[in-house]
Image: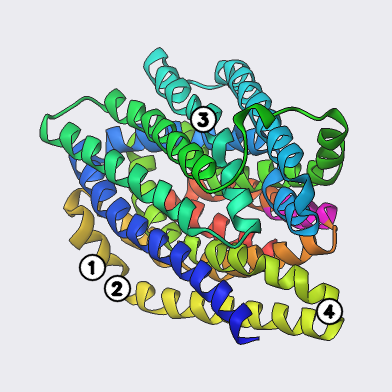
Amino acid sequence: NHQGFMKYFKNTSWLFGEKILRMVVGLFVGIWVARYLGPEQFGLYSYSQSFVALFAAIATLGLDGIVVRELVKDKSRRDELIGTAFWLKVMGAFGVLLILAVAVNFTSNDTYTNTLVFIIASATIFQSFNVVDMYFQAKVMSKFVVYANIISLFISSLVKISLLLNEAPLIAFAWVVLFDSIILAIGFLYFFLKNSNFNIRDLKFNKSTAVDLLRDSWPLILSGIVISIYMKIDQVMIKEMLGNEAVGQYAAAVRLSEAWYFIPMVISASLFPAIINAKKVSKKLYYARLQKLYDLMVWMAIAIALPMTFLSDWVVHFLYGEQYNQAGSVLMIHIWAGIFVFLGVASGKWFMAENLQMLSFWRTFYGMIINIILNIFLIPKYGIQGAAIATLVGQITA
């Protein structure tokens, strides 16, 4: 269907364009920030973000894919789905802040580090507005989400550059994380109200809808927490075992490795409605589309991993400078985890389409357990390279 293909192709192109712009601008500004702060301060900044990320999945409540699925199935339920998902996410965000208030007592953090953690964590409240993203995903109209993201990226980048030129302290960069989420929330709200006949008064909480959504999403909440843990626990453990500077070295490599992870997320998110629709037509078409998606994911990941393996030291030295001299060897190992991340994101869509979220949780859980166990043994023995090996093996296991 040529018309259908163009609809999804344009949608994917919008998302891809925004993510590539975000990657380029984010890397440029992010590398500048890393150079300015140095491994020690950058390590503390990355640790604070990682510590928040361990619990941030609770704020999303695993609703994103579920709400998109329900909006595609029944367009008439738009108002109750979006309204209920929004208030659930707000409650989840405040839940995260309460959990963090307890969790920091079990760390060796000082007051300054905890202040950074809570400033960054406050951003989760405003991330509740990404229910707008779900609506535009279901309608295959992601260009409006792209507009909001680009405006937010532009303003945020200008603020960061201003802070860099004025030699601002580390805590100022934590405030930018919160500021960025507020600007994005305003942008989402503006484009949503402008491009839908939605009335802000319709943003109501429906208890029965909330129960239905959470019944489907609770395995995804668990899965999201587990994913967050095995994506970020390495930086938290490195800080506790080796200190802030080691986290800075490791985080510099990981940011380059994970910069590519937007690719499977964009492609899978944009093609998910097409896969759901194919399931309605025929099982053969449904699995043919899934197989093409899997093939595309693996080959793209290999095409990224091969050159990065041989150029890792040069890339790190060129971008970050000599002060991050340990990051190259980490990048060389960590980049190969991308193959399994790409495949995992794509196959996650199959689990969701089949309503098998619990299986998705268990595969992720086993990967997390292996990752934590290997971190305990490998970080003391091999340092930050050991953490990279643990991440790779954890992803392969999942």
Badge 2 element: helix
Could you say which is closer to the camera, residue 198 or residue 358? 198
Task: State which tag comes first along the sequence, 3 or 4.
Answer: 3
Q: CA distance from mark 3 to mark 2?
A: 39 Å
Three-letter amino acid code of the residue under disc 1:
Trp
Main secondary-structure element of the magenta-colored stretch: helix
Residue at the disc numbered 1: 314
- Mark 1 touching mark 2, by CB under 8 A? yes
From the viewer's perspective, is residue 185 above or below residue 346? above
Residue at the disc numbered 3: 126
Within 10 angstroms of label 1, few (less than 14), some, or many (20 or more) residues? few
Q: In this rendering, which labeled residue sits more in front, label 4 or label 1?
A: 4
Q: Residue at x 20, y 45 (%)?
A: 35
Task: State which tag comes first along the sequence, 3 or 1.
Answer: 3
User: For residue 80, what is the image quadrant?
Assistant: top right
Residue 193 drawn at (x, y percent): 53, 40
From the viewer's perspective, is residue 130 above or below residue 389? above
Q: Which residues are magenta?
A: 357-367
Q: CA distance from mark 1 to mark 2?
A: 5 Å
Residue at the disc numbered 2: 311
Residue 59 drawn at (x, y percent): 63, 33
Q: CA distance from mark 3 to mark 4?
A: 38 Å
Residue at the disc numbered 4: 281
